[in-house]
Image (spheres, rainbow, N blue to C red):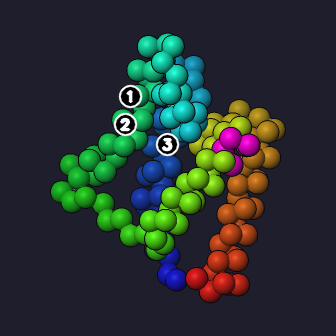
Amino acid sequence: METDFTPWASLGGGVLIGLAAVLLMGLHGRILGATGILSGLLRLDDPADWSLRAALVAGMAAGPLVFLLVTGAMPAIDLPVSLAEVILGGVIVGIGVSYGGGCTSGHGVCGNARFARRSMVATVTFMATAFATVFVTRHLLGA
């Protein structure tokens, strides 16, 4: 399986995520943890908090539309796995987020920037698991 390496798009995405995290912390005193923001939409007790969360999720979902406005074409989405595998992966990630007390954006971007030990441990765990998964699927299973 060949993987397309996109250094400029990756760098641009990283810069935007970092900028969003800094702005959210600076303007609202909040940590940009995507799953925490998304799960908070289920709580309706604080309308101002819900509005902020809804705006952040809408902004994340609007990415392809911004890409369309800039380039004139929708981004190509090429999934090397089936829809069932994508859904299963999402469920597994959701379980991991619950046990890990956060996601890669919360721990990896914001937690590490604050030198939080639990975020450093979580990030090492995410990365080690990702490396092992890629190794097993590509080299042992030949997928």
> Which range is magenta?
96-100
Which residue is tagged 2?
59
Q: Which of the numbered marks, if any, corresponds to residue 55?
A: 1
Q: Nearer the viewer, residue 77 or 32?
A: 77
Q: Are marks 2 and 3 in contact (CB under 8 Å)?
A: no
Q: Which of the numbered marks, if any, corresponds to residue 130?
A: none
Q: Residues within 10 Å of mark 2 (few under 14, many from 20)?
A: few
The location of residue 38, given as percent across then percent down, is 50, 35
Q: Main secondary structure of the magenta part?
A: helix
Front tag of 2 and 3: 2
The location of residue 100, given as percent across then percent down, is 73, 43
Seen in the picture, residue 142 relative to 50 is either above or below; the reply is: below
Helix, strand or loop under label 2:
helix
Tag 3: residue type? Ile
How far is the residue under mark 3 from the one under mark 1? 15 Å
Residue 114 magenta-highlighted: no
Q: Residue at x 56, y 60 (%)?
A: 88
Which residue is tagged 3?
17
Q: Residue at x 59, y 29 (%)?
A: 31
Side of 47 where 136 appears, left or right: right
Q: Nearer the viewer, residue 109 or 129?
A: 129
